Image: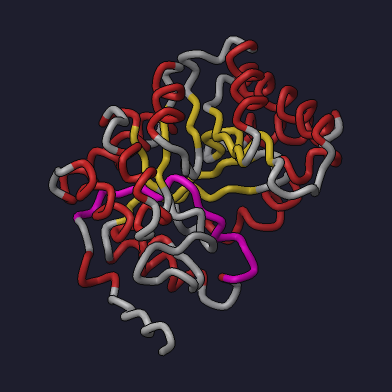
């Protein structure tokens, strides 16, 4: 017998109060070219008030910033992804610095870090680019949004040795276990939980979210990737965030509405947003 076809639940049926925040999205992606406005409007109908759009280069920022000129609730995160570390020379860093200084919507430097899962950039180039960008964030007094995949030891060593304990740092797309969560917590950092917390086999992540301090917890889609159940396997969007929120709330044994607003308030504080 084949697998049962998943039942796609309308996000409106699980909507939560206004005030939620998707801390990490890629709405400038080509996937949304035909219906970006509809996607943003749909997010608002389910309670997503704030969205952090991640630009993965100065060029992406210049090409995409005007997509959001009519949406002041969307803030920006700007940086060079570890896959593109080899392209991050001093000129690119100067461009990031100039944009961050001139555009108040740039709330953080990210997503930056290390990714050893795919061999798309030499480790040495990734490490150099990562080190340069965290120092730039410190110079700009901006929060940092971390991307780390299969590179936890090197990533944590660089940050801890670099004096980033208690720095405003968000570990994006957290997929680790309780042991990993405790190390991040000891460093005073924030943790953002994505859609895979809803996957049946991901019990380790659900155990980890139980121990994250309430004031350090954020939610994200990382759309167009990592759609939560029951939309797994489809293009993700901010309107699916309540599914993630409800799974996290279940794991923590709190009301979804309470968790939703708390995580939204955490995003406001972390990114320095205005209500």
Which residue is rendered at x = 46% and y = 14% of the image? 166
Query: Quadrant of residue 147 in the image?
Result: top right
Q: Is residue 144 above or below residue 222?
A: above
Q: In the drawing, does residue 243 fall left or right of residue 131?
A: left
Q: Is residue 135 above or below residue 108?
A: above
Q: Quadrant of the N terminus?
A: bottom left
Query: Quadrant of residue 133 in the image?
Result: top right
Which residue is rendered at x = 43% and y = 87% of the image? 2
**Residue 73 seen:** no
Which residue is rendered at x = 53% and y = 57% of the image? 68
Span colored in magenta: 17-31
Which of the pair 35/206 is nearer the observer? 206
Q: Position of residue 42 (x, y in %)?
A: 36, 69
Judge whether residue 27 is colored magenta: yes
Taking the view exactly as shown, the residue that stands out farthest to the front is: 1
Judge whether residue 232 is colored magenta: no
Q: Position of residue 237 (x, y in %)?
A: 45, 64
Q: In the drawing, does residue 182 fall left or right of residue 142?
A: left
């Amino acid at each position: 017998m084949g697998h049962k076809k998943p039942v796609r639940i309308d996000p409106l049926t699980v909507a939560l109060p206004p005030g939620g925040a998707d801390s990490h999205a890629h709405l400038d992606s080509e996937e949304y070219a035909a219906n970006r406005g509809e996607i943003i409007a749909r997010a608002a109908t389910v309670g997503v008030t704030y969205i952090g759009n991640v630009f993965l280069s100065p060029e992406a920022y210049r090409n995409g910033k005007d997509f959001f000129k009519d949406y002041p609730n969307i803030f920006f995160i700007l940086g060079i992804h570890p896959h593109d570390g080899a392209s991050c020379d001093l000129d690119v860093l100067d461009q990031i610095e100039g944009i961050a200084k001139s555009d108040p919507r740039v709330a953080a430097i990210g997503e930056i870090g290390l990714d050893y899962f795919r061999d798309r950039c030499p480790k040495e180039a990734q490490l150099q680019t990562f080190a340069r960008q965290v120092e730039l964030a410190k110079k700009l007094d901006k929060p940092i949004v971390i991307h780390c995949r299969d590179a936890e030891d090197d990533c944590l060593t660089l940050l801890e040795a670099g004096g980033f304990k208690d720095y405003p740092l968000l570990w994006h797309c957290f997929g680790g276990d309780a042991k990993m969560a405790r190390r991040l917590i000891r460093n005073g950092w924030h943790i953002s939980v994505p859609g895979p917390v809803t996957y049946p086999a991901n019990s380790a992540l659900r155990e980890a979210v139980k121990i994250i301090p309430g004031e350090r917890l954020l939610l994200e889609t990382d759309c167009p990737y990592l759609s939560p159940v029951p939309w797994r396997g489809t293009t993700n969007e901010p309107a699916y965030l309540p599914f993630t929120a409800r799974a996290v709330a279940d794991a923590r044994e709190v009301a979804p509405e309470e968790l939703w607003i708390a995580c939204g308030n955490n995003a406001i504080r972390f990114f320095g947003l205005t209500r």
